[in-house]
Image: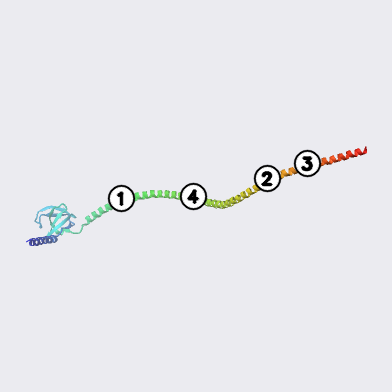
Amino acid sequence: MNRMITVLIATLLIVSFTQVLSAQEPKKAYVSDILILAVRTGPARNFEVVKTIESNAPLFILEEQGGFAKIKLANGDIGWVQAQYLTYDTPDPIIIKRLNRDLGKFKNQNNKQLKSIETLTQKNSHDLITLKNEKKELERILSETLKEKSDFVNKYTLIDKKHKELLESSKNIVATRNENEKLKKSNMELSGKVDELQSKNKTMLKIGMIKWFLAGAGVIFLGWLIGRSVSLKGSRRSGLLK
């Protein structure tokens, strides 16, 4: 039972789908190049005219019958018109109108783009001036940096030269210091010898003075003895003469 219901539902769905596929969609058409076209209530000239439409009016064809077409207007009204006065080609006035509309849009877009380009040009001009000024400033900074670099290189070269000279001087200083140490040591040894010689000299001076004193005393004593002897001899001679 359930299977039969399923088959029935599937059949109904297939039929409905087929009918939907077989139904024709309304075709868009236009009133051809005439002044006025009557819209009637049925597909014949004896049916009542309910309204009229002008040339180039857009509409949708729902079906065609006996030289008449059932149409649907843009406002939703439905009626019948003679199919010979309909065309599927877009009328030139509509094309021109669309082109004019598109041209107006293009002009608006073009004006907006021109304004944007003008604004962008002004901005670019301002940015260009700013960039030129920044370039000049960077060139100035670069020039100063290069000068500072050159000065630094010169200072570094001078410092390096002085450093090398100091290294050489330090070597000489070390050698001089060692020589001074040796000279100090020799000086101390010489000072000791000088002190020793001075001490010996003082001793020898004292001894010499004593010797000179003794020699002088001896001379004096010898002279006294000689004088004494001469005096005695004279006394003796005087006694003999008497």
Amino acid found under the numbered disc labelled 2: Ser
- Which quadrant is the N terminus positioned in? bottom left
Residue positioned most to the left: 1
Q: Is residue 72 visible?
A: yes
Q: Is the C-beta separation of discs 3 and 2 under 8 Å?
A: no
In three-dimensional space, the C-alpha distance between marks 2 and 1, rounded to whole angstroms, equals 121 Å
Q: Is the C-beta separation of discs 1 and 4 under 8 Å?
A: no
Image quadrant of residue 237? Answer: top right
Q: Nearer the viewer, residue 239 or 144?
A: 239
In three-dimensional space, the C-alpha distance between marks 3 and 1, rounded to whole angstroms, equals 145 Å
Front label number (3 vs 2):
3
Image quadrant of residue 83? Answer: bottom left
On the rendered structure, is 26 left or right of 107? left
Amino acid found under the numbered disc labelled 4: Glu
Disc 1 target residue: 112
Q: Nearer the viewer, residue 138 or 239?
A: 239
Q: Residues within 10 Å of mark 4 (few under 14, many from 20)?
A: few
- Of callouts 3 and 4, which one flags the residue occurring earlier in the amino acid sequence? 4
Q: Is the C-beta separation of discs 3 and 4 under 8 Å?
A: no
Disc 4 target residue: 148
Q: Is residue 67 visible?
A: no
Q: Residues within 10 Å of mark 3 (few under 14, many from 20)?
A: few
Amino acid found under the numbered disc labelled 3: Ala
**Tag 1's secondary structure?**
helix
Disc 2 target residue: 199
Q: Nearer the viewer, residue 103 or 214?
A: 214
- Of callouts 3 and 2, which one flags the residue occurring earlier in the amino acid sequence? 2
Front label number (3 vs 4):
3
Amino acid found under the numbered disc labelled 1: Lys
Front label number (2 vs 1):
2
Identified at 80% across, 41% down, the residue is 221
